[in-house]
Image (tube, grey):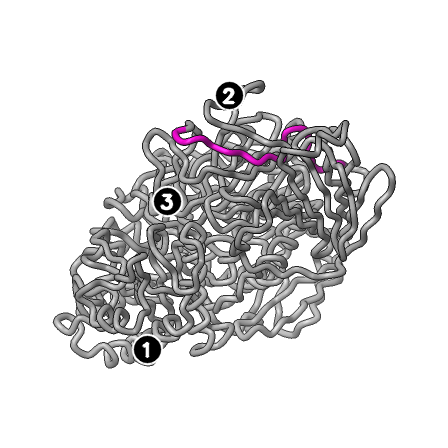
Amino acid sequence: MKFTDGFWQLRPGVTAAYAQEAYDVTADGDSIVVTAPAKRIQTRGNVLNLPVLTTTLTPVADGVIKVRIEHHTGVKAPRRFEVNEQRAAGSLAITDEEGVVTAGGLRAVIKRGAPWDLSFWHGDTRLTGSGHKAQGYVTLADGAPVATDPAGVAGVTTTGLAPARTYVHEQLDLGVGELIYGLGERFGPLVKNGQTVESWNADGGTSSEQAYKSIPFYLSSDGYGVFVNQPEHVSFEVGSESVERVQFSTAGEALEYFVIDGPTPKDVIDRYTALTGRPAEVPAWSYGLWLSTSFTTDYDEGTVNSFVDEMRDRGIPLSVFHFDCFWMREFNWTDLEWDARVFPDPKGMLHRLHTERDLHISAWINPYIAQRSALFAEGKQKGYLVKRADGSVFQWDWWVAGMGLVDFTNPDAVRWFQDKLRALLSQGVDALKTDFGERIPTDVVWHDGTDPMVMHNLYAQLYNKAVFELLVEERGERDAVVFARSSTAGGQQFPVHWGGDNTSSFPSMAETLRGGLSLASSGFGYWSHDIGGFEGTPDPAVFKRWAAFGLLSSHSRLHGSDSYRVPWAFDEEAVAITAKFTQFKNTLMPYLYAASADAAAKGVSVARPMFFEFPDDPSVAYLDRQYMLGGELLVAPVMSASGEVQFYLPHGTWTNIWTGETVPGGNWLTETHGFETLPVYVREGAAIGIGAHADRPDYDYLDGLTVRLYGADKELDLTMPVVQPDGTAHVIRISGTPDAPVTSEAGVTVQVVSRR
């Protein structure tokens, strides 16, 4: 949201009061409180008739400092995200020149007097800071033009009129060459510099600037992160209004944010997810291939069985079968009742899929209750649906006719919805696809009185939390998994998330990957996408390339809109490619599941941007067509009909996983691949665990395990973690020489693929 007209002027109708000096710097408990008047105080008369901003600095964890900027403090305290603050987490010091808040290696320094100067330091390195005209309280006159139009905000017109009349903003410095990442699942450029980013969830697909998962957190290449603790609409100007700064603004009287220390991107993510919640551990079976009915296709039990049996007969291991929307009767979503016309014996069918075909079952749900659903009348009678100001149930026809929304701010409504789902789980459903959650109106009243602007984004959190916690209760902590589309900050606690509605093309494949890397830069540990694209029907080349990419993601699903995604619908080579990469992924599970445990422990995503692993290599800063799968495997999906792909290998020696050929890094490569391969290179010094079972993802990873060494030293002295599907952790120690390796675990084979 832009308030200025160039460097010198404000836009017409905009009035701004900026923090001009740190007039008072005092200690208040474990915080430093700064009084910042909107003009320099030179005489006693200057203290009258002007706004004052109060800035409070608090250490809340090692390497994390909270900043709260307030204008009027008498307003109702806004609802914020749930965070894990630690009191007495740091120290305060106040002198005649400055106030200093220290939290581990991070310091916030506020200089007394004018000009306003708040800076953040890691040791002797200045990370960023808030300077002249950075902290502001902005008032808009009626009709004042501001450059924003967040999709779906009540009151925003096509002319860009803002829904509120007061805003608080902060601006933090951008250094020379500093790059900004994150801000949720964004499908545009990975580097956010130059962009206006609206933190406002919308159902906009992958080919727009909108986002299903808006996360008001960004990650800087200069070794820190910033989390804006405002669930409502937050507008970010990333070097796009003041090109030297990142501005973030929100409506109202206060703004709260956290500065999070690094120094590495993974360190920032570790601290950020300690603050907002770690990704939960997900079951090993969820890493296998998921096959869906697709959306509007025709299917019944016979169709399902034919798909499942054909996958087995063609050598494609299947872990999960997913029933999309039409498992329920049309116009009834969500009533959680199987359509008896096509599924007359759902419990028996699910039992057979479990016992005869060894599958886990996923079912589609959403929190919208159609008027024709029996749950609508019940929810209305009990007061469990979101209401309008006049007490009537909110309804619209956008999606399903006459639909209402479950009010997850009502604890009784949460239990009611969970109990309805509990009956579905008792029939044999193992996982739930928690679709939608973005189209949340703002002209409503919530049970607990939460501001509707806050609930627009926060709804996804409460929805996914309710479902995930039910799955934990019914299935256990390590066996719970959702397949969620919408989310916000903290949503990483309720995995897995998929990338939403993409299209069946190479450009959409590329934008899908950008979204996943952006989400990984926002603290999410796992990520999936619709192989082949959702909208349309992919040509065989797109499907085969996407199958390889999708099966080298943390989670892999075949799903479409109006056409099936069974591989034989494309050609016989598609069958072979899907079989090869599904089996390959299953054998990689000892490696992948260790990466999964790391995601749960530190928040670092399984599939991650290149700069996570190589933050000191400037050549990786903009790379958004390749990624690291875990810390050791580099993957560059082929996104062209010709099979040509360009990618960059960072410094060091890399080994082609398919051929064993070694290649020096620090170079760009151009390769042409047939459908049976794509660039996958192994980092020098890596130990990759290869399992003995290609037919499933959940097995004893130590049984027949082979440890492949890449770029092995002449004298071996390394360890490799193995985490079993039940969570039992092992550390395999490898010593000796490449010609005579010794392992600490009996039955484990060591294979030296390449040497230094």
Q: Earlier in the sequence, mark 3 or mark 1?
A: 1
In this rendering, the answer to whether 265 lies above or below 551 is: above
Q: Earlier in the sequence, mark 2 or mark 1?
A: 2
Q: Is residue 632 visible?
A: yes
Q: Nearer the viewer, residue 645 or 250?
A: 250
Q: CA distance from mark 3 to mark 1?
A: 34 Å
Q: Say which residue appears at 36% left-offset and 50% top-offset.
A: 442
* Left or right side of 219 for 535: left
Residue highlighted by disc 2: 5
Q: CA distance from mark 2 to mark 1?
A: 60 Å
* Left or right side of 425 for 301: left
Mark 3: secondary structure: helix
- Mark drawn on residue 545: 3
x%, y% of residue 665?
Answer: 63, 36
Q: Nearer the viewer, residue 156 or 598?
A: 156
x%, y% of residue 700?
Answer: 53, 74
Residue 244 placement: quadrant: top right
Q: Say which residue appears at 31% left-offset and 47% top-offset.
A: 533
Residue type, numbered disc 1 = Gly
Residue 714 counted in the magenta span: no
Q: Nearer the viewer, residue 570 or 476?
A: 476
Residue highlighted by disc 1: 428
